[in-house]
Image (spheres, rainbow, N blue to C red):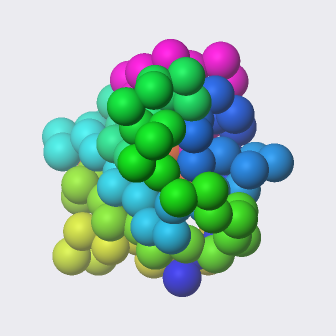
Amino acid sequence: MTILRCSATTCIYNKNELCSKGEIDVIGENARYSDETSCGSFRDRNDEAVKSSCADGCGCEKIKIDCKAEKCTYNENCKCTAAAIGIAGDGACDCRETKCDTFECKC
Ligand code: SF4
């Protein structure tokens, strides 16, 4: 499993820059740059519909990451193999405002 630090503190799963979701999906099928990736699991913490269906888990340092950014050096069969990654998304209101900062294109 990968160590995850996440700066998207506006996400309902974010607990002190750790993620409480247990597993996340990173998207960006044809990404060649970090900016073309995003955390598909981001949910705005003010979204009432999500709030009510969300267990209030603790932030875990290690997390399972499914990733569609297959051009990334760390991607093996749509799983992230990096030891540690950073998701960036200060002030994000939407998943498109987040990105995997660790993305490195093998292209
Ligand atoms: S480091 Fe690469 S494989 Fe891992 S989540 Fe980020 S983009 Fe996906």
Does 70 sit above or below residue 63? Answer: above
Estimate the x, y position of residue 13 in percent, counting from the top left: 58, 48
Q: Please tell me whether residue 95 belongs to the stretch shown in magenta.
A: yes
Estimate the x, y position of residue 81 in percent, counting from the top left: 45, 77
Q: Is residue 61 visible?
A: yes
Q: Which stretch is magenta?
A: 86-96
Nearer to me, 23 or 101: 23
Residue at left offset 44%, top offset 67%: 23
Is 35 placed left or right of 8 in the picture? left
Does 5 sit above or below residue 37? Answer: below
Is 75 placed left or right of 45 in the picture? left
Estimate the x, y position of residue 4 in percent, counting from the top left: 64, 61
Nearer to me, 94 or 65: 94
Q: Is residue 74 visible?
A: no
Estimate the x, y position of residue 7 in percent, counting from the top left: 70, 37
Q: Please tell me whether residue 39 belongs to the stretch shown in magenta.
A: no
Residue at left offset 74%, top offset 50%: 15
Nearer to me, 45 or 25: 45
Is 2 placed left or right of 60 in the picture? left
Quadrant placement of the N terminus: bottom right
Does 51 sit above or below residue 47? Answer: below
Furthest-bottom residue in this view: 1
Residue at left offset 29%, top offset 45%: 27
